[in-house]
Image (cartoon, coloured by chain):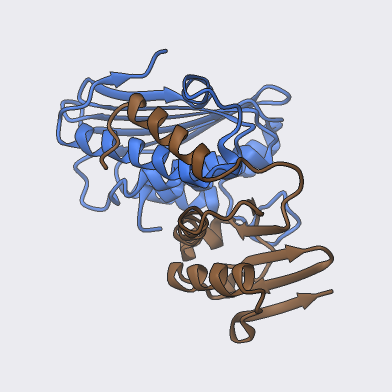
Amino acid sequence: MKITSLEDLKRIKEEAQKRALLREGKAEYKITVHMGTCGIAAGARQVMAAILDEIAKRNLTNVLVTQAGCIGLCDREPLVSIEKGTERVLYGDLTPEKARQLVASHIVNGQIVGDWVVHTER
Amino acid sequence: MKELSLHILDLVENALRAGARRITISLLEDSARDLLEMVVEDDGRGMDEKTRQQAVDPFFSTKGKKVGLGLPLIAQLSKQCGGNLEITSEEGKGTRVKATFRRSHIDVPPLGDLAETLFVLLASHPEVEFIFSHEVNGRRFSFRSSEVFRALGIENPGGNPVLLSALRDWIAYHETTLREGQTNEDYKP
C-alpha cells in the first residue's frame, strides 16, 4: 500500500493498534545505536532503520531503540549495544543485514552472536 | 559521507546533545540562484563565542576526545562546493548551523534518503519537536512532528514501530513527488 496522505497514516495507525499493543511499562531489551559522526559515516543510520524495520515486521513490543554518541571505537563502527537487565553486549562492524539477524538471534531467540561481539558486561 | 541527509543527521545529533527540545530542519533548493541551503536550528544550550569559533577545528571537541569531525567535514564540503558554513549561537538560547552549496557543483553529494534520517530521529526522540521543511523551486513539503502525531491521535510513536514505518513511507512519498515536481503540501491540521 502506498501511503500518500495522513488519512492513510490514520488507517495504518488503527491497524497497528489492533495488531500490536503499544508498549506499556518497561521494555525488556534496550538497543542503543551509536550515532556519532564516525557511526553515521560507517552506516549507523541504515543499521538503525533495519533494526526498527525488523522490530515492526516481527511485531516486537518488548524492545526500546535509542541512540548514543561516539564511544571511541570508531574503527569498529557501526556499533550497537543490547542491554537486558545488567547484561550489556556490544556488537561491532555491523551492516543492516547483520542487524536484522541480531534482532532474530539475540532478541527473539536469546542467543548472543559471539562472532560479532566486541565487548560484554555483566 | 555519501549523502547530505547523513550530514543533516549528524547536525541534528549535535543539537540533541545540546539538550534541544525543538529542532528545525530546513532545506532550500533554488535552480535560478543555483543554491542549495541546509539549515539546522535548535533551542539547546548554545555555545560561547570561543567554542563557536573552535567548532570547525577538527582537533577540537567538547566531548573529551582529541578530534571532532562533524562540523569540519560539512565546512570543508560546502567550501569545496562553492558555498560556506555559518554558525550562529547564543548561550542558553540555541544554535543555528547553515550550510550552503552551489547546487550544480559536481561535488555536491546527493540528498540521499531523507525519509530514513527523519525516521530514525522520530523513532528515537519522540519527545523532541521536529519541524521539517524542504523547498524545491518554490514547491514545498513541510510538517511539524507534534502536529502529525496529534492528527494521528498519538502522543508518542516511539513504542509503535509499525506506525513509524508508515510515517517513513509517507515522508518518502512526498520527497519523491517533490523531486518529480508534484508535491506541494504544507501539512497544517
Quarter of the image with the N terminus of chain B is: bottom left
Instruction: Return the x and y of residue B93 as percentages of the image width and height.
Output: 68, 22
* Residue at 52 percent of width and 72 percent of height: A94
The residue lying at 69 percent from left, 64 percent from top is: A71
Q: Nearer the viewer, residue A98 or B178?
A: A98
Q: Is residue B147 above or below residue B78?
A: above
Residue A105 in the image, given as x and y percentages of width and height: 58, 75
Residue under the point 26% across and 53% down: B107
Q: Residue at left 63%, top 72%? A: A106
Which percent across, then down, holds residue B41? 53, 28
On screen, residue B95 above or below B111: above
Q: Nearer the viewer, residue A106 or B136?
A: A106
Q: Which chain is blue?
A: B
A15 sits to left or right of B18: left
Identify the image quadrant of residue A6: top left
| Chain A shade | brown
In depth, the one of B156 and B171 nearer the eye is B156
Q: Position of residue B153 (x, y in %)?
A: 53, 22
Q: Farthest front residue? A: A18
The residue furthest bottom is A115
**In this orientation, does residue A80 appear?**
yes
Residue B8 in sight from this viewpoint: no
**Number of numbered discs present?**
0
Up the image or down, B111 lies above or below A107; here it is: above
Q: Is residue A88 left or right of residue A32?
A: right
